[in-house]
Image: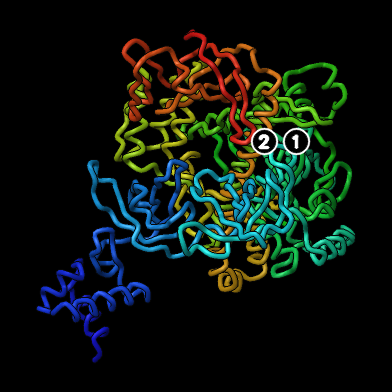
Amino acid sequence: MNAKQSLLNQFKSGAFALLTDEEISKKLRLGKRESLAVRDILRALCREGELLCDARYRYGTAEQFGAVTGKISGNERGFGFFVPDDSDLPDLFIPRRALKNALHGDSVLAFCTGGRAGDEGEVLAVISRGYREIVGIYRRDRMAGYVTPDERKFDEEVYIPANKHNGAKNGDKVAAKINSYAGRTPTGEVIEIIGRAGDFLTEENALIRAHALRTEFPEAVLAEAERQAARPVTELTGRVDLRDELIITVDGEDTRDIDDAISVRKEGDKFYLGVHIADVTHYVTRGSELDREAFARGTSVYFPDRVLPMLPPALSNGICSLNEGEDRFALSCLMTVNRGGEVTEKRVVPAVIRSRHRMTYADVTAIIRKEKETAERYPDLTDFLTDAAELTEILKEARQRRGAVDLAVKEAKILYENGTISVPDYERTVSHEMIEQFMVLANESVAELAMQKQLPFVYRIHETPAPEKASAFAAFCNETGVPCKFDPENVAPKDFQAVLNGLKDSPLFHVVNRVMLRSMMKAIYSPENKGHFGLASSCYCHFTSPIRRYPDLCIHRIIKESFLSAEQTKERYKNFVKDASAQSSECERNAQEAERDVDALYLTAFMQDKIGMEFEATISGVTSFGLFAELDNTVEGLIPVETLPDDSYYFAEEKFLLRGTRNSFRLGERVRVRVDGVDRGARRTFFALLEKI
């Protein structure tokens, strides 16, 4: 046995665990020359991944350090946070000195070092790099160039050798490929010039590029979509013909794809509700070019000026869209609902439908409110929508009794038409609630059918909040005077619902709702049914949007194939649903971040000509560096701490409070602000505080 293997065996036995090279040499009673050889062997074992070394030059295995895997979330000030892959473990603060060349997005091995609060950690090794490409601003000096990343959490410039700039000029927004992480700074090359930094379209395209979103479809995918779209809607074998049913679609005026329709009728004490969803799987078969592209995209992504669809327009806006007056294939969830809001019968059938009307939320609301002019345009919908409105109230009351939490957070709706940006007042009407209730009921019913059949499936899960998060939310409520009585160790949906019910019509409602959401786990896709906390649902899935979400497309396919052979379907999809769940969750997260970033860019442009104007607002965020205030149209701005009235401020994080000797500011308080400026690069609006209201 050679010296290296002998040394490694001593570590595996635990004899040398967490010792320095000097301590090992002393233990072995080695001379100076042999001690240097031991140090070289230890370094070689670290390079080979057999051992790890911490900042105190102690050596050991990952298990001996108590190291776990996770990702680094960086910070522009140089430190970072370690987010373990195991969600049951707490995040760790990683000081700059303990990052060991790890950067934002990297997968690493790290361990807890304790620290003053017991939440400090250290990176032991980088497992894989999070970024192979980065988007940022190129600048060049006499010797070489650098790309300063737009992602401020990525706290390193990328060095660009003189022969690798590919025509980029100072001030260009570029995409750079990172070729090496060796040395003091990453090294790379410019692979795309996006445009001039600061230009609005360039900044939007840069955000889309930074999130690695697919903006074009491969030719093979487009060709297959055209072939599929040309197929006539005539293959009716095995389908229920519902074309004589009164079926309508209800969407916003600017909806780009229509994949759901409804039918409602009341007979005695029973309601017969049909939720009819475009049968996309008729055209997108498993393993096809279309299916592989849809899997890779995971979801459609929506921006104010464009949509990046999951499926090509020939399908998403064509043959799969439930257009008024046109025959379309559907997968219909047919439910019988009693006056208690319970589904007494349910089934899913392949169908052919013909939408009678393409309705908007505004028109449906007008008819329900008995506005004569709109009602006279649609005389056949009076009874239909009366029944639908009654059923909506029954379902809302049933969901309230179950303890469902109102997760409808007030968000800005950004409109972009002919180069003009507008942000209309937030509005959620009875028609929005109607479609929401019907879709949720269909999603639950389909998930329950899949559970009964024990099919492999992609569920939509929302787990119970972690006790520490629930405890922090309870502390916030108590500090702001909001009634709150629940056990953080055993919180239930009804507990959160009770908090919100006590705030109806209060300006605090949306602020508390937002803090509540932050305390919850994130909803994800999973092959295991773990229930949906927010909806107080024991079983839930996404069934209603197969044009724009891959999980819906996946479970449509599973449901249809199970009609022919449940056993074969179980065998065929038992492993695939794991991959589909993981991929869809990751694509959804990335798409949401991209939409949020682009929306922020549009909001800064919207506020540009409002500099100097005054507004009323609600304090929506409290940090050590200032206050965030939200206008009534949901536009949010930062009030920097240095612009607040002269005082010495202390940030009480657990109380969402910025406290000074003479002034204090708390989440939910009303203030009057002036728009002071916008920073398009940072996608941020700045306010000046005028007074508390």
Task: Give neighbour class at mark 1: few <14, some 14-19, many 20+ (Cα, 10 Å).
Answer: many
Residue 640: image location, x then y, percent? 48, 23
User: Please, what is the three-letter code of the amino acid marked with disc 1?
Assistant: Val
Q: Are the residues tagged 1 and 2 within 8 Å (C-beta)?
A: yes
Label 2 neighbour load within 10 Å: few <14, some 14-19, many 20+: many
Which kind of residue does numbered mark 2 sit on? Ile
Dot label at residue 250: 1
Q: Nearer the viewer, residue 256 or 334?
A: 256
Residue placed at 63% from the left, 66% from the top? 562
- Residue 617, quarter of the rendered image: top right
**What colour scheme has been applied to the protein in the rendered image?**
rainbow
Q: Is residue 185 visible?
A: yes
> Residue 336 appears at what percent x and percent y?
63, 43
Does residue 132 sit above or below 28 in this rendering?
above
Q: Quadrant of residue 676?
A: top right
Q: Is residue 241 visible?
A: no
Helix, strand or loop at label 1? It is: strand
Seen from this angle, which residue lies furthest front? Answer: 142
Q: Tell me the residue at 57%/56% (across/down).
A: 159
Q: Secondary structure at mark 2?
A: helix
Residue tagged 2:
435
**Residue nearest the viewer, comparing 51 with 597:** 51
Left or right: residue 13 versus residue 399 is left
Q: Residue at x 46, y 58 (%)?
A: 184
Q: Which of the image's four quarters has the N terminus? A: bottom left
Instruction: Estimate the spatial distance between the alpha carbons at disc 1 and disc 2, rounded to whole Å.
Output: 8 Å
